[in-house]
Every structure is written in C-alpha cells, then in structure tokens.
Amino acid sequence: MAGKTASLFKSVLGALFGVQSDKQRQHDFSQGKAWKFIVLGIVMVIMFVLSIALLVKVIT
C-alpha cells in the first residue's frame, strides 16, 4: 500500500511540474485509477495555491 501511495504522489508531482516521463505516464494510465490521480491533483494544486497565498501574505 505504501509503495502504491508513494508512486501515486510521484506521478502527480511529476505531472504537475511537467517532468513525467512517457514511460511513467503510460504505466499510470494502464495501472492506476483515473479518479485517484484527479483527486490528488486537485488537492495538490489547492495546497500549492494556498501556500503561495500564505507566502505572499507573510512577505507583504
């Protein structure tokens, strides 16, 4: 379970930053369930936006 969770995070982070390999992307689409990637992607984008907003608030 922990290996699958780590792989899911790695895949979503790679996709968010645009550094995911084609081999990994093909593996994700053949092995993973799309809803897991979508939900985790949305959560990570929200966390990113909130962290940038907090950083701006602290700096200014």
Image (spheres, rainbow, N blue to C red):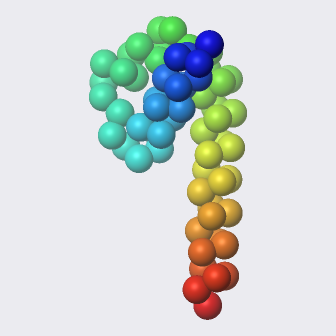
Most extreme residue toward the top is 30
Residue 54 % position (x, y): 66, 72
Going 65% across and 72% down the picture, which residue do you hit? 53
Q: Is residue 59 left or right of residue 50?
A: left
Q: Quadrant of residue 19?
A: top left
Q: Quadrant of residue 55?
A: bottom right
Q: Is residue 25 left or right of residue 6?
A: left
Residue 35 % position (x, y): 68, 23
Going 68% across and 43% down the picture, which residue do you hit? 43
Going 47% across and 40% down the picture, which residue do you hit? 13
Most extreme residue toward the bottom is 60
Residue 1 % position (x, y): 62, 13
Q: Nearer the viewer, residue 22 or 6?
A: 6
Does residue 13 lie above or below 24 as drawn? below
Does residue 9 lie above or below 32 as drawn? below
Does residue 58 lie above or below 18 as drawn? below
Residue 5 % position (x, y): 59, 22
Q: Is residue 38 left or right of residue 17?
A: right
Does residue 6 lie above or below 27 as drawn? below
Q: How many marks?
A: 0
Quarter containing the C terminus: bottom right
Q: Is residue 15 left or right of residue 33?
A: left
Going 37% across and 43% down the picture, which residue do you hit? 18
